[in-house]
Amino acid sequence: MKTRLADLRADDVCQIPLSNLDVSEAKRFQDDSIWRYFERLRMEDPVHYCQASPYGPYWSVTKYRDIVAVDTNHKAFSSEQGVAIVDVPDKHWTQSFIKMGPPKHGEQRHTVSPIVAPENLIKLESLIRRRVKTILGSLPRNHDFNWVDMVSIELTTQMLATLFDFPFEDRRLLTYWSDVAVAIPKAGHAIDSWDKRSTILSECLEYFTRLWNERINAEPRMDLISMMAHSPATRQMEPSEFLGNLILLIVGGNDTTRNSITGGLLFMNQHPSELRKLRDNPELVSSAVSEIIRYQTPIAHMRRNAATDIVVGGKQSRRATRSSCGTSLVTATKRSSRAPTDSSSTARTSGSISRSDSASIAALVDILPNCS
Ligand code: HEM
């Protein structure tokens, strides 16, 4: 029933005047009708200007080559105004290294990146496998249950707690802070104001400051807090920058992994022949992981701001400032021209996603740069 409703809505896509097409609406991702929007944009207007959205005007770039052109042109396209479509009010703005330019970006990134280096991931492998088995083994049988909560969130948050060496019994706080951090305040919602969001996130800062103070006085260890506390690049951070980097790491680790696990399950459920193929050929698991991330799109969008007047896909994007609502977005496209419709789809891509993989991740995306 849900699918038919989504199809019906999707058909309406063709009726919408192109100039009104807005892919920033969250509900399109919720009811899975977004793909027809991207499909139409790719066919009719791959570098699309949306004049009126709840977030202000923005450009939407939906073709692979244009996306790569934007994502790899760091001089013309900047992350300094943030990587999400919403403009955070100055009072609530926190700095983090994803929004910085060189050299600070590289220095801070280098501080934490060893946590996801292959050597460290190999060390974590048996723990991850144990946890997966325990979580799956404890699921109720013959009863409905919430997979997102009991599997995707639980596994993700357990691993995040390990990466931070965060008190295990409090691990759901990480999920909570991540959800609060990405919430766009709206009347009637749990987070109904930017002030409320900031108050909750200041509790996050307070909690992590206690951990920081313990770790800065101890020997360096392989956890994200200890790594930041002992690195010359991060040990002098202002509280707001510490919070910004915490949010980056919590949200970066949380949403992506939890959405991939959930989307992967849904995909296997909708394509049982792919699941069968994987079961019969377990060596395909690593390419299946890449494929799931490409197809499922764990990140709904990434933003860039045009730092200069520039032409993308034949369209002129003017230099945009944050105050003029300039927004650049990259949103995952995945299902576009490479939808896994045939039986070889799981085997098609190889390799696995890694933190240094942002170029290949960009390959999954639609971008939406912006101008005033
Ligand atoms: C399925 C898993 C993941 C996906 C698909 C993913 C995707 C991405 C993408 C697309 C970017 C680039 C953002 C941009 O272009 O502005 C990024 C950056 C980042 N991600 Fe992930 N990520 C994943 C897992 C994680 C995990 C587990 C962590 C940490 C615990 C993490 C932390 C970060 C950080 C810190 C950055 C910023 C890097 C920088 O500024 O250089 N991510 N991720």
Image (tube, rainbow, N blue to C red):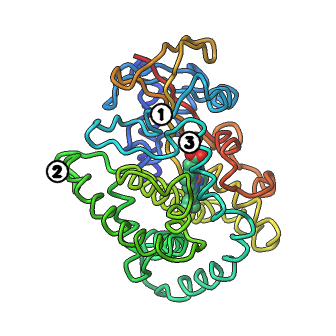
The kind of residue tagged 2 is Gly
Q: Badge 2: how crowded within 10 Å, few (<14), some, or many (20+)?
A: few
Residue in the foreground of this view, choosing between 328 and 103: 103
Q: Residues within 10 Å of mark 1 (few under 14, many from 20)?
A: some
Q: Closest to the observer: 26 or 115?
A: 115
Q: Is residue 296 in sight in this rendering?
A: no
| Mark 2: C-beta under 8 Å from nearest atom of ligand 1 | no
Instruction: Classify mark 2: helix, strand or loop.
Output: loop
Q: Out of 114 and 276, give the one closest to the viewer.
A: 114
Image quarter of the N terminus: bottom left
Along the line of sight, the residue nearer the viewer: 341 or 361: 361
Find out whether the residues at labels 2 and 3 contact each other: C-beta distance under 8 Å: no
What type is the residue that disc 3 sits on?
Lys
In percent of width and height, residue 247 lies at: 42, 55
Of labels 3 and 1, earlier in sequence is 1
52 is higher (above) or lower (below) than 283? above
Kindly identify which residue carries mark 2.
188
Q: Which residue is mark 1?
A: 80
Point out the frontmost of discs 3 and 1: 3
Q: Vertical placement of 81 versus 297: above or below? A: above
Is residue 167 something that shows in the picture? yes
Q: Nearer the viewer, mark 2 or mark 3?
A: 3
- Disc 3 to disc 1, C-alpha distance: 12 Å
Image position, residue 276 (x, y; %): 74, 70
- Label whose residue precedes the other's in the sequence (1 or 2): 1
Mark pair 2, 3: CA separation:
39 Å
**Is residue 191 positioned above or below 316 on the image?**
below
Does dot 3 land on a helix, a strand or a loop?
Answer: helix
- Amino acid type at circle 1 is Glu
Q: How many numbered callouts? A: 3
Q: Which residue is mark 3?
A: 104
